[in-house]
Every structure is written in structure tokens, then in C-alpha cells.
Amino acid sequence: MPHTTPAEKDLIGREGGSPSNLREQILEANQAVHALEGALYLARHPEQTHGYQRRILTATLDRACARLKPGAEVLDLGCGTGYLFLEFLQRGFSVTGVDLSREMTEALENNIPSVHRARARWVNADAETFAREETKLYDAVAMSALLHHLHDPGAVVEAALRRVAPGGIFLIFFEPLKQKIPSRFRYVLHRLLTRLHETLYRAEMRWRGIPLFEDRYALADYQRQFGGIDPLVLLPVLERGGFQVLELNKYCSRRYAWAAWIANRILKSENTFNLIAVKADTSRP
Ligand SMILES: C[S@@+](CC[C@H](N)C(=O)[O-])C[C@H]1O[C@@H](n2cnc3c(N)ncnc32)[C@H](O)[C@@H]1O
């Protein structure tokens, strides 16, 4: 990572630009699409909030947070409208959120209960730039559904790892996984299930009057053209940063809980991963 694909070469050729120009264009595309997403982001993405996914979220955060001391400081990169941010806040931690999109953090601000406000801070910035310029260390650095929006996820992970205090944790949650297709038959069933729940999802969004912006996501979801993120590529980055991976869980995200249940329990397909790693504490004997 980053790869130079035919699509990228094409874009560079057309724009007469360079990869760094492409990086800027991906940032702009993300700003544009998330300005449209705004407060309705999670309503538009029920795959993050239905019961099946919530159980995964709660269990993962329970395990990660068990390693944090009370009042620990958490950095949430690409915090959006507060999916992880609010969970950490409700668990008593102090949380700093970083997000490129002002519209997303405006929604976040409205979602923060006043009793927790004193422990909440948010910044509008590019995650990589923030991680490189910030000098403070955090007890936990987390990100949910951020990496597939980036030009160079490896570089962002590397910068993020430097912000973790010794003994602290690093969490990647709900990231599209570069999938393997172990069985053609199961893959066909997986596609059929996708078609069914996507049809129902579109009908539901139409009925609820919630517009979808899928055609606007092409460049913003930059890593999807490579099939998502391969966590194996991140393992050497974690190792170099002095981290030990505690868990890497792969599973299948679907728009609805029933579809997630079928995908995970029956089809056993995988399109998403969560990862928890801990930084070695060299100050301890
Ligand atoms: C798919 S949303 C996920 C939001 C939230 N973490 C969640 O799980 O609900 C991706 C978020 O990353 C933000 N984002 C995209 N590129 C970014 C970048 N380079 N730096 C910081 N935030 C970025 C977007 O504005 C958006 O809020």
C-alpha cells in the first residue's frame, strides 16, 4: 500500500497529477460525500447499529476497555457522528475525535449528552496529518470504518500507532476486509443474500425518505477498488511499532441483523474485520 492501479493511473493521467494530487482528491471526495451524509449517517448505515452488530461492538469494546484504567484518554480517528466516540465516552473515558468532515462532527456534537461534554473534544483534520503533528500519547487509539477511505492506510496506521502510550491499545473496528472466496457455492449464496438485503434496504430508505449517495462514494471509498483492507498487510506495521495483536476477528457485515445471522452462522462468509493490539510497555520490568 498504496497500490497504483489502472484506475489510479487513469486518474493521474487525466488530471495530469501525481499520487499526492490523488491523495488530495480522495480527501476532497471524502469531504464532499460526508457533507451529504451528516446527521443521517448511521440511519443510512443500519449495518453498524442493528442488534447483531451491536453485540459485536459491545463485546469488542468490553475486551479492549478492560485493558484501560478509569479515566483513560482515547483518540478516535475518523470519528464521524460518534459511533465509537460515544461508546468510549459513556464508559467514562476522555475522548478526542478527529474527522475530516465538519458536517459529521456537527452531528457528533449534537449527539453528545451534556453530562459527558467535559470529557469530549473533537477536531476537524486529516487523520494522518493530525497523528503526525500531535505530540500527546493516548491510552487507546481507535478507528471504525476509516481505513478504506484512505489513499495509504498503512501510513495512517503507522502514524496512529505512534500516538499510543506504552501499554496502551490500538483498535481497528468494522473495516471492509479483502475477501477470499473459499467455495464458489458459498460465494454464490453470499451474493444472493447481498442482492436480497440490498433490495430491501433500498426500499426501506425510499420509504423513510432517506437519500442514498452510493454513486458519490467511488473515489471516497478508495480502497474498495482493491477489495477492501488486507489486515495481513498491517501486521508488519504493528510489529515494527512494538505492538502485539491480541485478536483479529473476521466476520460478515449485513444491512439487517437476520441477514448478518445467516451470513455468519450458516454461510460463514467474511467481509469485515476488527483488530485489537497492545503496545509493549518497556518501562515495566
Ligand atoms: C464510514 S465513516 C465512519 C464514521 C465512524 N467512525 C463510524 O464508524 O460510524 C468514515 C469517516 O471517516 C472520515 N474520514 C474520511 N477520510 C478521512 C481522513 N483522511 N481523515 C479523517 N477523517 C476522515 C469521514 O469524514 C467519515 O466521518
Image (tube, grey):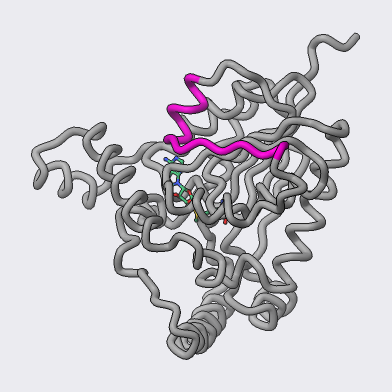
Residue at point 80%, 42% (across, down): 64
Q: Vertically, is 280 above or below 29?
A: above
Q: Which residues are magenta?
A: 118-133
Residue at point 74%, 28% (across, down): 139
Q: Is residue 273 visible?
A: no
| Residue 65 left/right relative to 220 | right
Q: Give how far across and how far down residue 99 sits, in percent.
A: 48, 42
Q: Vertically, is 276 above or below 238?
A: below
Q: Give how far across and how far down residue 157 sits, in percent.
A: 54, 33
Q: Vertically, is 272 above or below 215?
A: above
Residue at point 72%, 41% (across, down): 276
Q: Vertically, is 44 above or below 91?
A: below
| Residue 156 left/right relative to 251 | left
- Tell me the quadrant of the picture where the N terminus can be found: top left
Q: Give how far across and how far down residue 263 sits, in percent.
A: 65, 76
Residue at the right extreme, as displayed? 285
- Tell me the quadrant of the picture where the C terminus can be found: top right
Residue at point 53%, 27% (across, down): 158
* 255 inside magenta stretch: no
Q: Is residue 250 visible?
A: yes
Pick the front one: 98 or 165? 98
Q: Give how far across and how far down residue 162 sits, in percent.
A: 60, 21
**How many circles with numbers are drawn on the protein?**
0
